[in-house]
Image: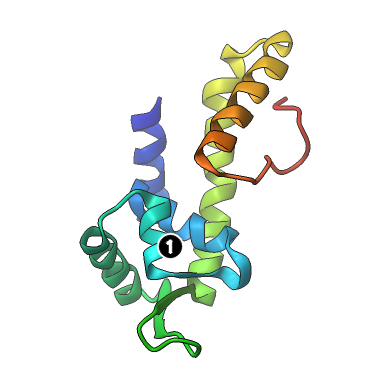
């Protein structure tokens, strides 16, 4: 299932899973911008691996790298308009793919327990966002 979802992202949008995750992190960030170190940390990447990924995304004009106006030692990564458009389209399709793959396997009665478990994992990891569109997966 997961391999198929990753293949769909690559085929339909030209995005690897790491590129998708980076663009998604930026899309969800305030002002669609993160410090390079924050982005690397959120992706669980070394700074070198994250830097290489950002270089590729910048070359495709999906992100912009700029020195922070507040601190010249800090590099800020922002989504470009092209990046925002791509991640919005890719996420819509990706959510649809996840629903097609997983919804048939989840009974309505299981949804509350699964959501509670997912929220405990998110809280443990320091993730505060909730799923869009409410609490029901179906």
Pinpoint residue 120: horizontal percent, then vertical percent.
Answer: 60, 28
Question: Considering only vertical position in the picture, is 36 above or below 125?
Answer: below
In the image, 74 versus 88, the foreground residue is 74
Work out which quarter of the rendered image holds the N terminus and state it: top left
Q: To which quarter of the image does residue 8 belong? A: top left
Residue shown at 29% from the left, 61% from the top: 50
Question: In the rendered image, is residue 25 in sight?
Answer: yes
**Residue 123's x, y, as percent?**
59, 36
Q: Position of residue 46 (x, y in %)?
A: 25, 56
- Which residue is pictured at 73% across the width and 9% down the height? 109
Residue lying farthest right?
134
Q: What residue appears at the point 29 percent right and 52 percent down from the top-left corner?
A: 45
**Quarter of the figure that contains the C terminus:** top right
Say which residue label 1 marks: 38
Crowd class of label 1 (few under 14; some 14 to 19; many from 20; radius 10 Å): some
Horizontally, is 41 left or right of 115 in the view? left
Give the secondary structure at mark 1.
helix
Decide which of 84, 134 is in the foreground and name it: 134
Q: Residue at x 65, y 46 (%)?
A: 129
The part of the image, by quadrant, that contains residue 67 is bottom left
Task: Say above or below: 58 vs 109.
Answer: below
């Amino acid at each position: 299932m997961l391999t198929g979802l990753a293949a769909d992202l690559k085929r339909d949008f030209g995005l690897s899973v790491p590129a998708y995750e980076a663009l998604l992190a930026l899309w969800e960030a305030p002002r669609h911008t993160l410090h390079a170190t924050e982005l690397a940390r959120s992706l669980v990447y070394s700074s070198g691996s994250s830097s290489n990924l950002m270089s590729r995304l910048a070359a495709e004009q999906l992100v912009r790298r700029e020195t922070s106006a507040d601190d010249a030692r800090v590099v800020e990564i922002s989504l470009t308009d092209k990046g925002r458009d791509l991640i919005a389209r890719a996420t819509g399709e990706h959510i649809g793919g996840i629903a097609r793959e997983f919804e048939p396997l989840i009974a309505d009665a299981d949804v509350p327990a699964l959501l509670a478990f997912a929220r405990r994992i998110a809280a443990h990891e320091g993730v505060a966002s909730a799923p869009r569109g409410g609490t029901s997966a179906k």
